[in-house]
Image: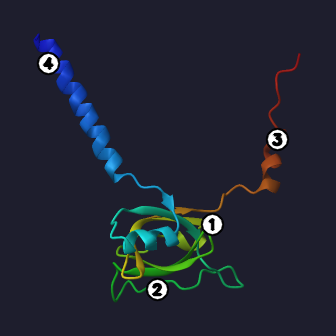
């Protein structure tokens, strides 16, 4: 074989290896019920759970537990998934800054001992654009006039 053929085969093998290694770390969107079932079956795979924070009458999130003086790397909260199942979540890092304002929360992690241990918290904050404000900057864009 020529050296160029060997080089091409090595590059292809490396690409296949990279693709396989990234697929093993990929997780899917799930619910707390599925995360509990996976944990009970001994499956340590990480899942993404989408949900919201329960709020009081004044729209403030309830159930947040964070004391940066006592332990800045412990944040616990309750989250409700898309099937309306509430679950206690523990995040062993500082509390994300805009979690209180978020419309939706995505957590990545797995169930451990009846608690969802989150490795990541992703928030979707409310849009800074409100529908009633959209038309105030000028007329809407239109197609070219003939």
Identify the residue under disc 1.
103
C-alpha gap between disc 1 and disc 3? 29 Å
Are there few (<14), some (14-19), or many (20+) residues within 10 Å of tag 3? few
Identify the residue under disc 2.
65
Relative side of 28 to 137, left or right: left
- What's the colour scheme? rainbow
Identified at 71% across, 55% down, the residue is: 129
Which label's residue is closer to the chain start, 4 or 1?
4
Which label's residue is closer to the chain start, 2 or 3?
2
Element marked by disc 4: helix
Query: 30 or 146: nearer the eye?
Result: 30
Quadrant in which the C terminus appears:
top right
Position of residue 98 measured from the top left corner of the image (x, y, whole percent) = 53, 69
Identified at 41% across, 86% down, the residue is: 67
Tally the marks. Answer: 4
Identified at 51% across, 83% down, the residue is: 64
Position of residue 5 measured from the top left corner of the image (x, y, whole percent) = 17, 14
Cβ–Cβ under 8 Å for marks 4 and 1: no
Cβ–Cβ under 8 Å for marks 1 and 3: no
**Given the current orientation, which residue lies at the most extreme bottom position?**
70
> Which numbered disc, 4 or 2, marks the residue closer to the eye?
4
Query: 11 or 61: nearer the eye?
Result: 11
Which label's residue is closer to the chain start, 1 or 3?
1
The answer to whether 66 is drawn above or below residue 29 in the figure is: below
Position of residue 16 measured from the top left corner of the image (x, y, whole percent) = 27, 34
Identify the residue under disc 4.
6
Can the viewer see residue 119? Answer: no
Element marked by disc 3: loop
Cβ–Cβ under 8 Å for marks 1 and 2: no
> Which numbered disc, 4 or 3, marks the residue closer to the eye?
4
The answer to whether 115 is drawn above or below residue 23 in the figure is: below
């Amino acid at each position: 074989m020529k050296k160029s053929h060997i080089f091409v085969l090595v590059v292809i093998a490396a690409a296949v290896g990279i693709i396989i290694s990234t697929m093993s770390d990929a997780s899917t969107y799930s619910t707390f019920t599925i995360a509990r079932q996976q944990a009970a079956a001994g499956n340590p795979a990480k899942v993404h759970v989408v949900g919201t924070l329960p709020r009081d009458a004044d729209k403030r999130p309830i159930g947040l537990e964070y004391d940066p003086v006592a332990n800045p790397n412990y944040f616990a909260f309750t989250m409700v998934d898309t099937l309306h199942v509430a679950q206690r979540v523990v995040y062993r890092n500082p509390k994300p800054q805009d979690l209180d304002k978020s419309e939706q929360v995505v957590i990545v992690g797995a169930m451990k001992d009846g608690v969802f241990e989150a490795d990541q918290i992703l928030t979707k904050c409310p849009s800074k654009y409100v529908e009633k404000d959209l038309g105030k900057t000028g007329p809407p864009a239109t197609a070219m006039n003939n």
